Amino acid sequence: MKKVFKIIAVNLLALCGLLLAAELFAAGIVVRKELLTEHYVMQLCSDEKVPDITITKYSKEYVKRVIDRHFVSKFNKYYELKDFRTPAVGKSYNGDKDIVLAGCSYAYGTGIEQEETFGEELARNLHDYKIYNAALEGGSPRETLYLLRNYKKCAEQGIFPQNAANTKFFIYTFIGDQGRRLFFDIFRISPVFKSYKDNNGIERLAYTEKRSIFDKSYIKFFFGYNYSPKLNDKLIKATTLYFSEMKRDVEKAFPNAKFILFVYDDENYDYDWSILEKEGITVLKLEKMSDIPIGSDEKYLYKSHPNGLAWQIVVPILIKNLNM
């Protein structure tokens, strides 16, 4: 009997050793990738040359910031106020018409000045509106759903309008890379939602603060960075569920707002958007509204993100299609 226990103990120790080695290997890869991401974002946000990453105090600060993201104490802190753009105000705004934008770095405006962003261009074209930009760099429907579920707090913080009744449009900007962010934390720690069925048998999403050991591991982050989602049943289901929930939450938080899903770029994400249209969601695809190669022509890009010129073209098209 002692021999059996000894064998089991040795095997368990060996397994723990393998897992620890895998975790350390994954940590090394993830930290390196996140350092490069931090460096890339700094390059995006600066016209000056950003020093290369070297073993200096400068890069040690990078390392500390990157590793801090994965401490347990950080897991329920999904955003800071400095993460959001300042609202854009039309020159004739009198307080009764608002628009809320949401999404990722495209809607946020990574790498461009405030004056060049999606929100500012809307305000220049819609003089009597105030545009709130709730988009987050590296964001996904998970962040937006979390913000909507905490509408009152977000309104107090100025992320959302305080008078919800004045909001006329809630526009979510989607890009194909958000698909993998539904399952993995890629560029930021994202809120976790679990599916369940309500009393009517309808599948819904509920926020949970619980995360498994695997969720908090570098191994999962490693898989996330290297995951290229294929459009399988799981991804179709997740995409449909998140946007269906988002529509419900928008209608609850902003009773007079129309929810718009603006598909800026869904390359390599061959989802059938008519699924959501059948659920009453207005889906606008940029490639169907314009023949201009805005998503691929370097003239309209700043390091792979839309630049000010891109939004100057996109916004009038969007306004026309929405009859704003």
Image: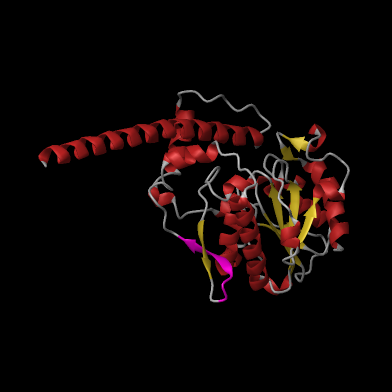
Position of residue 258 relative to residue 105, above or below, is below
Residue closest to the far bottom: 199
Picture layout, residue 301 above or below residue 215: above
Q: Residue at x 66, y 45 (%)?
A: 105
The image shows residue 24, relative to residue 233, as above or below, that is: above
Q: Which residues are magenta?
A: 200-208
The part of the image, by quadrant, that contains residue 323 is bottom right
> How many numbered marks, from 0 up?
0
* Quadrant placement of the N terminus: top left
Does the rendering let one see residue 15? yes
Q: Is residue 286 left or right of residue 66?
A: right
Q: Is residue 70 left or right of residue 290?
A: left
21 magenta-colored:
no
Query: Which image quadrant is residue 294 in?
Result: top right
Residue lying at 61% horizontally and 56% vertically, measured from the top left: 237
Image quarter hosting the C terminus: bottom right
User: Could you say which is closer to the camera, residue 281 or residue 274?
Assistant: 274
Q: Position of residue 268 (x, y in %)?
A: 70, 41
Q: Is residue 162 visible?
A: no
Percent coordinates x, y for residue 311 in the rendering: 80, 46
Q: Position of residue 161 (x, y in %)?
A: 66, 66
Residue 174 sits above or below residue 92 on the image? above
Name the residue furthest left: 2
Magenta region, main secondary structure: strand
| In front of the other: 196 or 139 | 196
For the point 76% across and 71% down, the residue is: 96
Closer-to-camera residue (230/318): 230
Does residue 81 appear to the left or right of 272 in the view shown?
A: left
Residue 34 horizontal/vertical position (percent): 52, 35
